[in-house]
């Protein structure tokens, strides 16, 4: 059975995808025939499509991982638990007013080049696609050629935080319009699609809206949550990896990876139904489809 995997955007929460891949291999389930990702889903999904071993991905996000090493030239209040007491808000405000983004994205692009070994889509062992949103045309675009790092940088270019990628338009994170691009897998001819998501929008405490970036991210999340799911955006089945972790919280990344592994293992019955062969498998997937249309929310 051919199947496609779709990975939602989720920032730091998306580190759970590494745990998913670890569980998938331990359960000796078939690797996906196609991977589609948005934002963090494009980064983890792209690395796996390239053939990067799960152990290597885990090693990158060890306990001492500090995301602020890859963001900007000065300490800015983007991410939690990795900042000094004195934050240069003046510098942040100046950058946001005088530039199309608070951070140029150069350091994170270099980091992505290193992670992907400067490889391209053509080097992937599993066909890979990711999405971005073009501010010029006002349309979602599919990235499928060139350097993986370039596509990852565009797909994860959160508005206000990173300068948009200038590539036949001004590309930003497509989470603002389509955080789980199931339609891309459908367009590529895949009928059996498993999506990893972070569920419906959940309430937040006022204390969590502690920076202008947090307010912007929450505003966009609330806006996009109102977009109804189209028929071609329903996967065959999905696993909700939500655990309340903020998309900005990169503290203790190993804990989030372990959570993804545990959550996937808890869904062994669903996965077995999804991967069952023959007529029995077809019937199982039809049942999963019906359940998905009742419960699916992104």
Image (cartoon, rainbow, N blue to C red):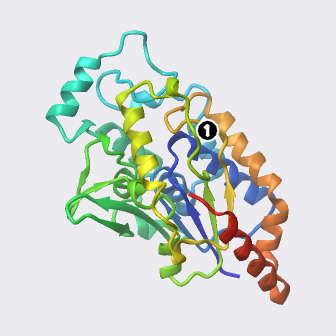
- Which residue matches tag 1? 59
* Residue at the top extreme, as displayed: 85
x and y percentages locating residue 297 in the rendered image: 60, 59
In the rendered view of the protein, which quadrant contains the N terminus? bottom right
Of the pair 94 and 112, the residue shown nearer to us: 94
Q: Residue 213: name its quadrant.
A: top left
Numbered marks: total? 1
x and y percentages locating residue 260 in the rendered image: 70, 47
- Left or right position of 98 against 170: left
- Identify the residue at image location x=64%, y=76%: 3
x and y percentages locating residue 102 in the rendered image: 26, 34
Mark 1 burial class by Cα count in 10 Å: few <14, some 14-19, many 20+:
few
- Left or right position of 16 against 23: left
- Left or right position of 280 against 127: right
- Identify the residue at image location x=17%, y=37%: 99
Q: Residue 71: name its quadrant.
A: top left
* Residue at the bottom extreme, as displayed: 279
x and y percentages locating residue 138 in the rendered image: 26, 64
In the rendered view of the protein, which quadrant contains the C terminus? bottom right
Q: Secondary structure at mark 1?
A: helix
- Identify the residue at image location x=47%, y=47%: 115
Question: Measured along the vertical axis of the image, is residue 38 above or below residue 103?
Answer: below
Of the pair 72 and 123, the residue shown nearer to us: 72
Question: Measured along the vertical axis of the image, is residue 14 above or below residue 286?
Answer: above
């Amino acid at each position: 059975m051919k199947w496609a995997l779709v990975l939602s955007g989720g920032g730091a929460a998306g580190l759970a995808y590494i745990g998913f891949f670890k569980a998938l291999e331990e359960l000796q389930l078939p690797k996906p025939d196609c991977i589609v990702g948005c934002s963090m889903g494009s980064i983890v999904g792209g690395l796996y499509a390239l053939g990067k071993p799960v152990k290597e991905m885990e090693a990158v996000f060890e306990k001492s991982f500090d995301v602020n090493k890859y963001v900007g030239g000065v300490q800015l209040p983007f991410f939690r638990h990795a900042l000094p007491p004195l934050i240069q808000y003046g510098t942040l405000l100046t950058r946001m007013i005088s530039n199309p983004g608070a951070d140029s994205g150069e350091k994170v692009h270099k980091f992505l080049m290193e992670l992907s070994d400067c490889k391209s889509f053509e080097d992937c062992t599993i066909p890979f696609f990711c999405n971005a949103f073009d501010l010029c045309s006002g349309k979602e675009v599919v990235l499928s050629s060139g350097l993986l790092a370039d596509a990852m940088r565009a797909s994860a270019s959160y508005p206000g935080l990173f300068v948009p990628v200038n590539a036949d338009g001004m590309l930003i994170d497509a989470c603002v319009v389509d955080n789980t691009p199931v339609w891309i897998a459908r367009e590529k001819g895949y009928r059996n699609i498993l999506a990893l998501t972070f569920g419906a929008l959940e309430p937040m405490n006022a204390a969590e809206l502690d920076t202008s970036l947090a307010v912007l991210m929450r505003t966009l999340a609330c806006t996009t949550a109102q977009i109804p799911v189209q028929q071609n955006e329903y996967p065959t089945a999905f696993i909700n990896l939500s655990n309340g972790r903020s998309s900005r919280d990169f503290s203790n990344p190993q804990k989030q990876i372990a959570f993804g592994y545990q959550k996937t293992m808890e869904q062994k019955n669903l996965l077995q139904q999804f991967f069952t062969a023959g007529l029995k498998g077809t019937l199982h997937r039809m049942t999963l489809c019906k359940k998905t249309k009742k419960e699916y929310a992104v």
